């Protein structure tokens, strides 16, 4: 009997809690979150590199982004050379092989990516010095091996073949040619 009494009270309280919510009326939105990025601290290194730092100590993570401000160039008949070069970056360095490089990045729980005009990395703050060393080494002493070159070249060729029949890619090329001309970098 005691079990039925407790079950009855439980069902009654569940019904009363559910009855208090009016589902026909949309709930009022809460206050918009306030985003405060803060003012970056800027300074210049001896080698001329401009550094901007925005600190946020809520999480023990560090993210860095290197942007190389190269002017646009007309690659002409050598179109794709800069993207091919960028895809070869981050595949190890002259000091550390590709497999060891990737294994250490994974061990640190970091992320690192390179492009033709940028590089990005993030990790826990306690691993930041080693991550920065690896990133600098990969950018300054890239390991351009013939094997990696052939792999990346094959990827680019496959991507170009895929785009030959892709309507969106064709439309982008036509749009750029019409907007900027065929010889625009």
Image (cartoon, rainbow, N blue to C red):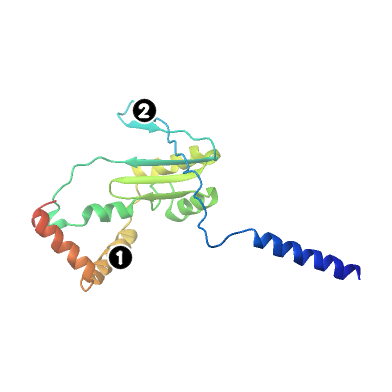
Name the one closer to the observer, 47 or 20: 20
Q: Residue at x 26, y 71 (%)?
A: 162
Q: Secondary structure at mark 1?
A: helix
Residue 53, visible in the rendered structure: yes
* On screen, residue 105 above or below 68: below
Image coordinates of residue 6 in percent, x first then y, are: 84, 65
Q: Residue at x 37, y 32 (%)?
A: 52
Q: Which mark is residue 155?
A: 1
Q: Residues within 10 Å of mark 2 (few under 14, many from 20)?
A: few
Residue 140 falls in image quadrant: top left
Q: Secondary structure at mark 2?
A: strand
* On screen, residue 140 above or below 92: above
Image coordinates of residue 39 in percent, x first then y, are: 39, 30
Image position of 110 (left or right of 150): right
Residue 67 falls in image quadrant: top left
Residue 141, visible in the rendered structure: no
* On screen, residue 160 above or below 44: below
**Which residue, as the protein is rendered here, is positioned at the far bottom?**
165
For the N terminus, the image quarter is bottom right
Residue 71 falls in image quadrant: top left
Residue under label 2? 42
Q: Residue at x 21, y 74 (%)?
A: 165
Name the one closer to the observer, 29 or 115: 29
Name the one closer to the observer, 159 or 136: 159
**Which residue, as the protein is rendered here, is positioned at the far right?**
1
Name the one closer to the observer, 155 or 30: 30
């Amino acid at each position: 009997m005691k079990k039925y009494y407790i079950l009855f009270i439980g069902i009654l309280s569940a019904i009363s809690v559910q009855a208090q919510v009016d589902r026909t009326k949309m709930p009022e939105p809460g206050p918009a979150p306030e985003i405060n990025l803060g003012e970056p601290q800027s300074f210049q290194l001896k080698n001329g590199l401009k550094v901007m730092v925005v600190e946020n100590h809520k999480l023990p993570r560090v993210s860095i982004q290197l942007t190389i401000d190269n002017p646009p160039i007309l690659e002409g008949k050598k179109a794709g050379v800069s993207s091919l070069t960028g895809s070869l970056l981050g595949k190890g360095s002259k000091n550390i092989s590709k497999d060891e490089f990737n294994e250490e990045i994974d061990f640190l729980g970091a992320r690192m990516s390179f492009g033709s005009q940028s590089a990005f990395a993030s990790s826990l703050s306690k691993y930041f010095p080693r991550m920065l060393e690896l990133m600098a080494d990969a950018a300054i002493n890239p390991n351009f091996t013939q094997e990696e070159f052939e792999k990346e070249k094959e990827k680019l060729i496959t991507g170009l073949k895929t785009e030959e029949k892709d309507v969106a890619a064709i439309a982008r090329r036509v749009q750029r040619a019409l907007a900027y001309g065929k010889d625009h970098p």
